[in-house]
């Protein structure tokens, strides 16, 4: 197969956090199977800047961009446009890799499912935290049965993003339009997605509580510090915290897993490291003689040797090597004409609980059923 021709939707503003369009251009530049052919952004200067770096065409109009002869698109636009732009690409049978979350409403999810059903192209959610080395290592340990039956897991995305509320000209960004509430949904895919990826499960019910943003940002409206308690279709209990406002040291990728035969926790800071305890190998767990934690990465050579062997070029996209592995899976799925690992259903599985969580929090923590995208 010839190089897949990629188009980037949303070049991004330089200086406002990470310009995701630029990140994917860098990552795709190291692919032997893909080339960036076009860049679209509503601001022509941003499209032209990003396109120059890839020797690609630049577009400030969406329709001509989609019709310029592409095979696939990467959607890096603000969240409110993800579903609409994904559907438009799928209707042209263009493969879609969309930034998170997948949609901003349940109705948008239905429309996206409908478009994907009619399309011959593949959709993948670009939940790059699922591709962190630590997450993949825990996933393979779980698949190997080392934790026994997993019945509880938790994730946290705690990241002070107040500096990203406006661009360098003072214009509000998508992060600055309502505290931590992105449209009607919680930005929970980074914390929830890896848990579901490890467990191969989906959320059936959620209840949530939140704080008023004005607590830590005077004059700001909206909600922040969402605490989500969930029950999965497989009967597991999950807890997720999402907070992009609190002033504190970051921990945007905290996870823990508890099973009948083992446990795992991410690092917490101050020199802490990811750790694990396994009943088939380590000290027994007793009330007065507690078991001890052991370094998780001691198992990396056994379970993820290929992750340790990649060169520095695999880090071009950022987030460690996660972009490299994610793009490899997406391109591989296209070439083999098979669903990617985080297909539309799985992408919605880690997006829709965030939409239902806002409904729950608005009702004082009422338990809310989460729609199953397979039945939309």
Image (tube, rainbow, N blue to C red):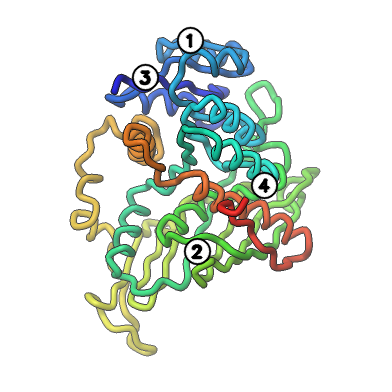
Q: Position of residue 305 (x, y in %)?
A: 20, 49
Against 20, residue 199 (above or below) is below
The residues bearing labels 4 and 2 have C-alpha atoms spaced at a distance of 19 Å
The residues bearing labels 1 and 4 have C-alpha atoms spaced at a distance of 35 Å
Q: Earlier in the sequence, mark 3 or mark 2?
A: 3
State the SS at label 4: loop
For the residues bearing labels 3 and 4, Cβ distance under 8 angstroms: no
The residues bearing labels 3 and 2 have C-alpha atoms spaced at a distance of 38 Å
Between disc 1 and disc 2, the foreground one is 1
Q: Position of residue 115 (x, y in %)?
A: 59, 36
Q: Earlier in the sequence, mark 1 or mark 3?
A: 3
Taking the spot 42% from the left edge, 23% from the top edge, the residue there is 25
Taking the spot 28% from the left edge, 30% from the top edge, the residue there is 313
The residues bearing labels 1 and 2 have C-alpha atoms spaced at a distance of 43 Å
Q: Position of residue 361 (x, y in %)?
A: 73, 60
Q: Earlier in the sequence, mark 1 or mark 4?
A: 1
Q: Earlier in the sequence, mark 3 or mark 4?
A: 3
In the rendered image, which residue does mark 4 sit on?
180
Is residue 294 at all visible to an observer of this figure? yes
In the rendered image, which residue does mark 1 sit on?
57
Label 3 Cα crowd, 10 Å radius (few <14 / some 14-19 / many 20+):
many
Is residue 320 at all visible to an observer of this figure? no
Q: Quadrant of residue 91?
A: top right
The residues bearing labels 1 and 3 have C-alpha atoms spaced at a distance of 12 Å
In the rendered image, which residue does mark 2 sit on?
154
Between disc 1 and disc 4, the foreground one is 1
For the residues bearing labels 1 and 2, Cβ distance under 8 angstroms: no
Against 64, residue 319 (above or below) is below
For the residues bearing labels 4 and 2, Cβ distance under 8 angstroms: no
In the rendered image, which residue does mark 3 sit on?
35
Taking the spot 37% from the left edge, 40% from the top edge, the residue there is 338
């Amino acid at each position: 197969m010839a190089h897949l021709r990629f188009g980037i939707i949303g070049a991004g503003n330089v200086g406002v956090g990470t310009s995701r369009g630029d990140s994917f251009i860098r990552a795709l530049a190291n692919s032997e199977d893909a080339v960036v052919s076009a860049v679209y952004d509503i601001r022509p200067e941003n499209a032209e800047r990003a396109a120059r770096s890839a020797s690609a065409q630049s577009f400030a109009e969406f329709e001509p961009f989609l019709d310029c002869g592409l095979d696939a698109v990467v959607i890096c636009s603000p969240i409110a446009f993800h579903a609409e732009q994904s559907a438009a690409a799928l209707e042209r049978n263009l493969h879609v890799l969309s930034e998170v979350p997948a949609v901003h409403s349940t109705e948008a999810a239905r429309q996206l499912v409908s478009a994907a059903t009619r399309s011959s192209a593949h959709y993948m959610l670009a939940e790059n935290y699922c591709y962190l080395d630590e997450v993949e290592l825990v996933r393979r340990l779980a698949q190997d049965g080392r934790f026994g039956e997993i019945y509880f897991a938790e994730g946290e995305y705690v990241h002070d993003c107040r500096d990203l509320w406006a661009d360098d000209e003072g214009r509000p960004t998508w992060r600055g339009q309502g505290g931590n509430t992105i449209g009607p949904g919680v930005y929970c895919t980074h914390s929830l997605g890896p848990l579901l990826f490890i467990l191969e499960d989906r959320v059936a019910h959620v209840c949530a509580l939140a704080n008023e943003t004005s607590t830590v940002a005077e004059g700001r409206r909206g909600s922040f510090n969402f605490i989500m308690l969930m029950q999965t279709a497989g009967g597991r209990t999950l807890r997720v915290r999402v907070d992009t406002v609190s002033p504190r040291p970051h921990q945007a990728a905290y996870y823990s897993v508890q099973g009948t035969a083992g446990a795992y926790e991410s690092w917490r800071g101050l020199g802490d490291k990811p750790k694990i305890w396994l009943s088939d190998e380590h000290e027994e767990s007793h009330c007065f003689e507690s078991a001890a934690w052991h370094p998780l990465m001691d198992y990396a050579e056994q379970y993820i040797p290929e992750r340790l062997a990649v060169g520095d070029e695999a880090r071009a996209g950022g987030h460690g090597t996660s972009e490299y592995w994610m793009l490899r899976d997406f391109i591989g799925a296209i070439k083999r004409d098979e669903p990617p690992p985080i297909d539309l259903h799985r992408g919605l599985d880690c997006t829709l609980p965030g939409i239902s969580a806002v409904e729950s929090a608005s009702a004082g923590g009422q338990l809310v059923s989460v729609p199953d995208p397979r039945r939309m």
